[in-house]
Amino acid sequence: MIRYSQCLIVVLFFMSIQTKAQLQITTPDTTICPNTSTTLQATIGSGVLTPLAFPSLDDSYSPVQNLGFSFNFFGNNYTSCVVSQNGYISFNVANASAFSPWSITSAIPGNTNVLNSIMGFYCDIYPGLTTSPGVIETATIGTAPNRKYVINFCGCAMFSCTTLLASFQIILYETSNEIEVHIGNAPNCPTWNTGAAIEGVQDNTGTLAYWVTGRNYPTQWSAVQSSHRFIPISTSTFNIIPIPYAPIPSPGSTISWYANGTTLIGTGTSISVSPANTTFYVAETVKCADTLRDTVTVSIGGGPTITNINPQPNNPNFPASKGNPTTCGGTNGFYTLYGLDPNQIYSVHYKKNGVQQPPVAVTSTIYGYISMG
């Protein structure tokens, strides 16, 4: 008696995808035959982030940056900005390539160093530290009218506390004019600049400002995987709400694959797996203090015992187990397998002259058999 394992391929669309996740396994949960393999695919949904060039290693504004669309901030429309190495962007483009003050001695509103600015993590940051340089990169991604301008601070050292690295992201949204700040890591350096830092927005006059509760001067604070959305209610009012942590990762991020979430089995956007038992696989990317994951499950098929021996040879509903071709080398012979579930699609794997052939999908009859010829 020859025994086979049933291989009914079942596709279930129950992938665990984070809200607005940027790392996604595109292979759905699936079932495969024993002793076979399947390929898992994952993508990182980001644009091409480009590192910014600054005129100095510390405390400077970038050259003028084009947003790629019009963005309304406190009632005024802007198409460009400048990025400060000290953790914020400003729409006062006259500051391009100039000195960016690092000392924080007053809160918002009223801090004249950050007029017309969006502060992701405004503090004294030292991205140009030669022994551990950080990266500040930008991109405009998406299509009109839903484009996003992204400013990414990756692994930037704190001044005077250079072993502490800041990673965070500011995203500007076209049309809605909303702002998101995703903080991967905002450490506190209490021995420098009194540990001051600000997360918020301020208008061009310094009379209107909104900030995340507890994150204004002179409060000392830190944050890990913390995200907020700044929603403009009017030309003078913002509403600030917490949101899931889901930054756009750098395209240089490496995808690592883990079997059952613990055993590293490889890296890259795809990987071939041949589990002996039902296994879940985790794809993970880590960069700039951001850790994003997605999960997929590969199950091993099972079912009734399948045989090529006719269980009811005298029953006309059960054909012979095999039929030889009418001529030597002909193609009209057949082979019958019994014991399957009725009216089900099976994926039949077989070899010809010792060479594995592509699988064939066959539907069983109401009597639970298939004939292949």
Image (tube, rainbow, N blue to C red):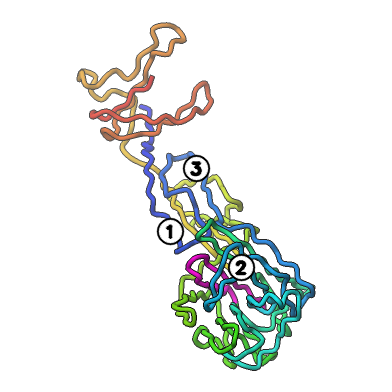
Measured as percent of width and height from the top left, residue 160 is found at: 73, 85
Quarter of the image for residue 361 reads: top left
Nearer to us: label 1 or label 2: 2
| Residue 174 position within the rendered picture, expressed as x and y whole percent measured from the top left | 52, 65
Residue linked to disc 3: 38
Q: Quadrant of residue 360?
A: top left
Closer to the camera, 109 or 36?
A: 109
Q: Amino acid at mark 2?
A: Thr
Give the SS element for disc 1: loop
Q: Is residue 69 visible?
A: yes
Establish if 156 lies above or below 115. above
* 107 on left or right of 313: right
Counting other residues with Cα less than 10 Å from the Cα at mark 3, is it few (<14), some (14-19), or many (20 or more)? some
Q: Does residue 24 appear to the left or right of 110 in the view shown?
A: left
Nearest to the eye among marks 3 and 1: give it.
1
The answer, for residue 263, to whether it is visible in the render is no
Residue beneath disc 2: 79
Disc 2 on helix, strand or loop? Answer: strand
- Name the amino acid, label 3: Thr
Q: Which residues are magenta?
A: 164-185
The first of marks 2 and 3 along the sequence is 3
Disc 1/disc 2 C-alpha distance (Å)? 37 Å
Q: Which residue is mark 1?
A: 16
